Image (spheres, rainbow, N blue to C red):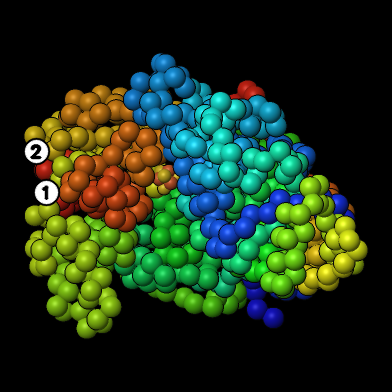
Amino acid sequence: MEKFVTLKGLVAPLDRPNVDTDAIIPKQFLKSIKRSGFGPNLFDEWRYLDRGEPGVDNHHRPLNPDFVLNQARYQGAQVLLARDNFGCGSSREHAPWALEDYGFRCIIAPSFADIFYNNCFKNGILPIVLAATVVDQLFAETAATEGYALEVDLPRQVVTTPGGDTFPFEVDEFRKHCLLNGLDDIGLTLQHVDEIKAFEEKHRAASPWLFRNADPRATGS
Amino acid sequence: MSGKTLYDKLWDAHVVRANDDGSCLIYIDRQLVHEVTSPQAFEGLRLAGRQPWRVDANLATPDHNVPTTDRAAGLAGISDPISKLQVQTLDANCDEFGITEFKMNDLRQGIVHVVGPEQGATLPGMTVVCGDSHTSTHGALGALAHGIGTSEVEHVLATQCLIQKKSKNMLVKVNGKVGAGVTAKDIVLAIIGEIGTAGGTGYAIEFGGEAIADLSIEGRMTVCNMAIEAGARAGMVAVDEKTIEYVKGRPYAPGEAQWPAAVAAWSELHSDTDAVFDKVVELDAEAIKPQVTWGTSPEMVVAVDARVPDPAAEPDAVKRTGMEKALAYMGLKANMPVTDIKLDRVFIGSCTNSRIEDFRAAAAVVKGRKVASSVKQALVVPGSGLVKAQAQEEGLDKVFIDAGFEWREPGCSMCLAMNADRLGEGEHCASTSNRNFEGRQGAGGRTHLVSPAMAAAAAIAGHFTDVRDMTA
Ligand code: SF4
């Protein structure tokens, strides 16, 4: 998992509440055998005028010019500004996979659906809850200023606007630790690399037959 | 201090570290990999820029999606594009990371749980995992084996470890000897009928007693395979002479130089006489008859000479509605004799019962007889290419084909209907697999779990019949 420490990122505003995971990544894309490559189908139904199918080249599909992410000024956005209850609905981890693949590293909203909120941390995305009034202010400023970017400082737990306003946010200590160090479950286990290696050596010495490859001469019949 | 159980010994020998929250980091000796639950795990590795911790600890083979008919066309012969993609992806991932894979047309390909022991890739004293719940099968060799999820598959690939909390100890003791015609499958179905599908939840089950000791290693695999159907993630049997004899000479087994030390270590793999179990269940082997499931859960099981149970006689209201629903789904009437259940299809296969002994037992019943004309299809699907070859060498394929059975290529096949082999709506199937859930073998299909000999007998008769009458 990629580390998250500080970020200065272009903001894209998605001004609607209750954006569910089926809107984030429609169900026909779940048949994939991958967890990468969902970015081109992020918000598929809103982003394109036709219906998306897995395996189709998205470059030739008609874009919906009214959808915010299709506007030139928001290309390359890394911070998604959203409304209440973002990420509700099914628990599919494909939703954060799609957001991350598209390029978003941080989502700011007044509230998030629980499972989605958890899934973000597992995939290197920082979800930030700010008061509804603050979020209103950020929406207004984003609309007014082309190239509007926010600074997100995870160690200090503050968001800073171009105008110098600072907004503190809450984050669970353990999750913060994992994000700062780019640790998922695997990352955490790999903090014990020395212990695993020491065990492995001892184990190999005691039971070397557990570490053998197949004898190419034997056929197994 | 009291002694250790087999499970305690296997667990203690693999603890890398104990975490503050009571979980442990457990070292994994062997991971078996198949095409359905591994793609996202490999993808995760790639995205994180990680390499497998120990490539040689993994062994892969496609099984769930592979066609069991002619494979001359190779991957191009898999008609469902999603199935084909999964098999292709497994090939590509194994090639990329250098993991040994028995590909679809390799003689050694088969159902992971058949292939592992057959290759000696599952050894006594190992921890074995696979992204598949029936990994409990491998406990038959005195290994600690359980099924894991896709994120855990990735965790094991990357770290060679699994984060686990220790289960409680349960002993299921089957005392005395079973009668003629009663097999490992009947024993385990009777156990599940006794303790229920949640009876083993939270426990690691050790199977013991004279009837278990009497079983061959293959029979013990059948029993351990269904530990998960009793709610236990792991089932196991102590190591004895048969275990050691079984392992000897297999491709991944210790060579001559290491053999004596390995055997010495393995002979410790049994519960100490003063070990204490959290729960002990005892069954009388003599009382076990050939079993048939009548409902939609493996615990809904009776002896072949019994009648389908009557919900009206069930005092527990929740159970009663469950029984009524099951009877409705299965299209059966309360109190009808089990032998009146007619079969549309017969399936002999799956990781529970697709080894050579299973086929010998079924062929012994079939020999010189014909599949009843009312049976639309009778399938025999070997657990691996090597099982298939062995059976052909013994002429078992001829016995089946002459009787009207179809003799197929190895794979999971009709066990879960992920490939083209499946039941039609409302069809009854005598199946040697392990799950009789609604729709498991195809939408609306009705599965009855039985032993290979009982399935063979049912195919001949067209309805269930006591195999002991046919072999007598
Ligand atoms: S044979 Fe059936 S139970 Fe066994 S691994 Fe295959 S699908 Fe699962």
Could you tell me which chain the residue with mark 2 belongs to?
B
Query: Where A168 falls versus B375 (above or below)?
Result: below
SS at badge 1? loop
Give how far across and how far down residue B226 sits, in percent: 41, 56
The residue lying furthest to the bottom in this view is B315
Circles 2 and 1 in contact, beta carbons < 8 Å: yes
Above or below, comparing residue B70 to residue A172 in the picture = above
For disc 1, the marked residue is B342
Ligand 1 within 8 A of label 2's CB?
no
Q: Is residue B317 visible?
A: yes
Q: Position of residue B295 (x, y in %)?
A: 24, 61
For this rendering, which residue is in front, B360 or B304? Answer: B304
Percent position of residue B211, x then y: 39, 60
Q: x and y percent of residue B363 in the render?
A: 25, 35
Front one among B91 and B160: B91
> Residue B369 sits in which quadrant?
top left
Q: Is A181 on the left-hand or right-hand side of B204?
A: right
Kind of residue indicated by mark 1 = Lys
Observer-nearest residue: A52 or B172? A52
Q: Chain of mark 1?
A: B
List the residue tagged with mark 2: B374
- At a point 60% along the width and 74% down the height, the residue shown is B275
Q: Is residue B191 left or right of residue B122?
A: left
Q: Residue B65: name its quadrant.
A: top left
What's the CA distance linking mark 2 and mark 1?
Answer: 9 Å
Q: Tell me the quadrant of ligand 1.
A: top left
- Secondary element at tag 2: loop
